Structure formats: C-alpha cells, structure tokens
Amino acid sequence: MLIKNNGQINFRNGKSKYYKSITNKRTLKSSTYITLIYVSLSSVWILFSDSLLRFFKLKQSLMTELSILKGWFFVITTGIMLYFLIDRSIKKLKQSEEELLRKDEMYRLVISGTTDGLWDYDIENNTLYFSSHLNQEIDFEASNILNPMDFWRKLIHPDDINVVYTEMKDYTDKKINKFCCECRIKIKDTDYVWAQVKGQGIWDDNGKILRIIGTQTDITKRKIVEEKLKQANDENVRLLNEAIEYDKLKTEFFTNISHEFRTPLNVILGSVQLIESYKDINNSHEFNGKLFKNISIMRQNCYRLLKIINNLIDITKIDSGFFDIHYQNCNIVDVIERVTLSVAEFIESKSITLTFDTDTEEKIMSCDINKIERIILNLLSNATKFNKPDGSIFVELHDIEDGIIVSVKDTGIGIPENKKEEIFERFRQVNSSLTKETEGSGIGLSIVKSLVEMHGGEISVNTSFGEYTEFLIRLPANLQPSDIEVSIEDTMSRKYLYMASVEFSDIYT
C-alpha cells in the first residue's frame, strides 16, 4: 500500500494494509461457509437421528447404546468433514496470499521502474501524494504547500492552470469520460517542461468522486518536434500561398501586357488605314494636316511600345544581374531640374501646375545620369497620369550633407493604405482591371525602386487616399575617384525630350 512519507509514496515491508484487508475478507468468507455447513449438518442430525432409531423399535438398552454411538459418530464425522474443509480453505488462503504478494511485488516494480510520475489526489481528505520519481522532478519547495489546489496553482504554468482546472472539473462532474490534458510544469533547476497529465477517478456507490490517481509524463521532446513540424508546415503553406499569388500575378501581368501591346498596335493600324484613305483628298493643306496628325499618333504609340519593351528588357537584366550602372560625378540638382523642365510644357497642357524648388543650387555627387533621368521621368509620368484636373505637381530637392532627398508630390487620387507596400512589387498595380482609366504595365515603379537601390539609396511613399501622393528618394552623396565633373549641356535637351516622349507615351491627349 502506498503511504505518505515526506511528500513521497513508498511501500511498507511485508503485507500491505490493502493485502491484509483482502486476506481478512477472504478468511471471514471461508469461516462463514464452514459455520453454515456445521450448523446445517448438526440440525439435520439432531432433528432426524432419534426418529430414525424409533422407527426400528429397538430395546431401550440398545437404544441407549445407539444414542451414545450416534453422538460419537456425529462428532467423528463432523470433525473429519471440518478438517477437510478447513484444510482446503487454508490452502486457498495460502494461494491467495502468494498471488497477492506477487501482484504486490509487480506493482512495486512497476512504480519504481516507470519513468512517469505517479500522483494520488484524495479529494475527500484533501491530500496529495507523489511517487519518488515525481517528487525528484518537481520543485520540492512547492510540495510543502498543504492545500493541493494551491500546490497545483504554483506548479503549473499560469497560462495553463485554467485548462487543467477546467478539465478536472469537467471530469469530476462526469461531463467527460477521462481526465487528460497537456500543460507546462515547473521542475527543479529549469523553467518549465511540457507534461501530459492523466487521471482515473474512484467513485463511491452514490456517484461521488473520492480520489483521482494519475500519471505525469514528460512530453517536452514531442512538443519540440510538433512545434518544428508546425513551423515547417506554416512555412510550406506560406511558400505555397506565395507561389499561388505569384502565379496569379503572372497571369494578370501577361493579360495586362497583352492589352498594353494590343492597344498601341490597334491605334497605329487605325492611323495607317486613315492615311490610306486620304489618297482621294485633293486639298493639299487638308491632306498635310491629317497626315501630320496621324503620324504624331503613330509616333506616340511607337514610343509606348518601345517603353514596354525597354521595361521588359531592363527587368530581365536586373533579375539576371546584367544591368549596368555608369557612375559619373555631376551636379545632381542641375540634372533633376533639366529633366523636370523638359516635361513642363506637356504637364501644363494637361491643366496641371508643375513647381520645382531646391534649397541648394549645387550638389556634386556620383550617379548614373541616364538612370536618374529615368527615375524622375517615371515619377513625373505617374504624377501626371494619376492627377486630378487643375491639380499640381511639386518637385523638391533638400540637401542633407551626406546625401540628398528628392520629393515628387502630386495632388492626385492617392493610394489606399493597404496598397502602399504593393506598388513597388513586381507586376503589382493598384487597379489591375482591364477597364482602368490609366494605362501601364505595373513594372515601372519596381524598376524605379531597383535603380534607386543600385545607387545605394532608398525610396518610400507618403499618401492619403483621394488627396495626394508623395514619393521620397534618399540618395547618398558619394563621389567617384576623379576630379572631372560632367557638365550638362543645353544640347542634352533633345535627349530629354526623346526620353520624356517615351516615358509619357501612355498618357493620351
């Protein structure tokens, strides 16, 4: 029998109280059977032996002798019968004793050899017992608490205590068939370990629970494996979702790029057909006017096709690592100002006000002039494309000693808050439907971000949906190991006009 010994459960030497209880019950049962047999035989003999002798009508002297013999016969016969019955009962009791001792030993070996902690919660007496193995693991100071509920509260992790209490209450209320839960248990010299706690209740005849005997098994290694499997599964799900999303983006991109190619080609084809129809016009002035108009339309759409093709080629070069940057020392303020002024007339023709401002007139730094021009033109093109009638565009430069900040702000439609991070992603567009009001392939800002980062800079966006959008570019003021500064000549204006024509080609009059 397990008894409490300084918070532990130990075995008594010899027969346990449980064994004695079982033995006493079996001894009482055998004694009862023997007594009943003896009383039954005695009653039969007393009631019927004299009647049997009178039936034969013997002499009185013979009757007396036979009565004496009858008594001795009863005593001897009863004695022999009782001897065999008692001997048989003793043999059975010895067998039962040996069987109980074997089971007692097996139970002791199981408890001493198991790696699980055993506990016994006596609800009726409000006591708690532990096996030696469990007592060695748990925080021994906590086991000095007299109230078992206070002990569990200190032993179990605060985040798990309600789970254990709820599980135990549901079990004692017979709402569930078994008590089994997983929680974190405080043990010696460490923080917490994961344990599986199981219990089996003992009930009285009225259905009242008396005690719960259970085990505590360390499942920390299993929990670690489960967590790793969960993380791996979450990562696989994430990668799968990314693959699905990327595949969706590619499908949308190719659908959109097909539309982007088809639109200018249809316009060019339509212009060619119109030019062919002008052969019957006799008025040379009218013919030249219509011819010039359609040639301009064809040129713009050719620029648009060229822009799409350039973007596709450049994005392929960036991905493959073959996109070259040619650094030169130059006045970055002059570069950005000239690029801005080159498109001022076109932007103002859209009833949009363009303003350029800078807090410094000169900032010599290393950059790829062509790539800076492309960055600014792309941002100005977007600011024009997504602006409102009678809107404004502000281009500002700020000297920050170790670099420069370029701001391109418009008073346009803005960007939804949940789309801010997506606009720089490959193939992303805020409005990806084919019925959108503005044109675009969805890769322009992705290229801009790559070009800025190739210069060691960073780009961000501030926006308020329906009010404004501001792109902020921060570039470091690095210098090439050369004293030669590249000057921006006025002859470069033709180059700016060409680049602007290409970049603004998807904005129709």
Image (tube, grey):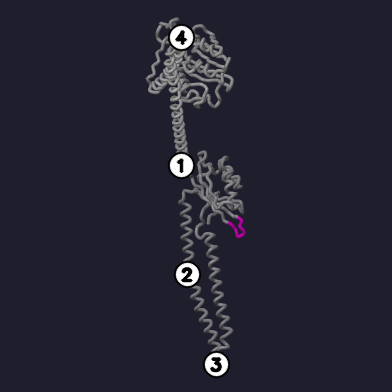
Cβ–Cβ under 8 Å for marks 3 and 1: no
Which amino acid type corresponds to the residue marked 2 in the rendered image?
Lys
Marks 4,3: beta carbons within 8 A: no
Q: Earlier in the sequence, mark 1 or mark 2?
A: 2
**Residue 56 tag number:** 3
Q: Which type of secondary structure does the marked residue at label 1 adopt?
A: helix
Q: Amino acid at mark 4?
A: Asn
In the displayed structure, 245 sits above or below 224; it is above
Q: Which label lies toward us, 4 or 3?
A: 4
Q: Which residue is mark 1?
A: 221
Distance of mark 2 from mark 4, alpha carbons? 139 Å
Nearer the camera: disc 3 or disc 1: 1
Q: Are marks 2 and 4 in contact (CB under 8 Å)?
A: no
Asked whether 418 or 404 is in front, the reply is 418
- Give the tally of numbered discs: 4
- Read off the magenta span: 203-208
